[in-house]
Image: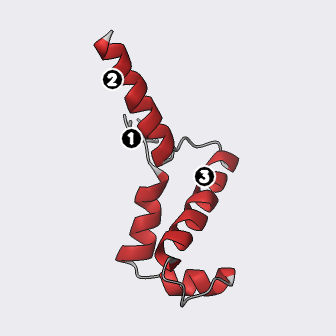
């Protein structure tokens, strides 16, 4: 018996943020809750950054693994450099 299903993979913060903000259309309610200017042309990006920071914090606090797009990019570039050597 397995209480959990094995999973070989990882989440990126932006995947969760985009699902919440775009699929469930909560950008404006989220922005209002944070006191962000909902008339700002960069509101979607600002809301996404704030939500990604909150996601990183909550995952780390709960001792779950998650990564951010910047770390994934750096890791991929390191991989490419190793492959070229």
> Where residue 49 sits in the image (x, y, percent)?
56, 63
Q: Is residue 42 above or below residue 80?
A: below
Q: Earlier in the sequence, mark 3 or mark 1?
A: 1
Q: Earlier in the sequence, mark 2 or mark 3?
A: 3
Give the residue pinned by disc 2. Answer: 80
Give the residue pinned by disc 1. Answer: 5
**29 or 39: which is nearer to us?**
39
**28 or 20: which is nearer to us?**
28
Q: Earlier in the sequence, mark 1 or mark 2?
A: 1
Q: Please tell me whether mark 1 sits on a helix, a strand or a loop.
A: loop
* Residue placed furthest toward the front: 41
Q: Quadrant of residue 39?
A: bottom right
**55 or 28: which is nearer to us?**
28
Answer whether labels 3 and 1 touch (C-beta < 8 Å): no
- Crowding at dot 1, Cα within 10 Å, few <14 / some 14-19 / many 20+, comes out as few
Cα separation between marks 3 and 1: 23 Å
- Which image quarter holds the N terminus? top left
**10 or 84: which is nearer to us?**
84
Give the number of the mark in front: 2 or 3: 2
Give the residue pinned by disc 3. Answer: 56
Give the number of the mark in front: 1 or 2: 2
């Amino acid at each position: 018996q397995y209480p959990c299903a094995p999973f070989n993979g990882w989440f990126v913060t932006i995947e969760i943020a985009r699902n919440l903000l775009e699929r469930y259309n909560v950008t404006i309610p989220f922005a209002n809750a944070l006191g962000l200017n909902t008339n700002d042309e960069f509101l979607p990006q600002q809301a996404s950054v704030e939500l990604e920071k909150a996601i990183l914090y909550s995952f780390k606090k709960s001792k779950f693994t998650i990564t951010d797009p910047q770390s994934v990019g750096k890791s991929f570039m390191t991989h490419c450099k190793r492959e070229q050597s």
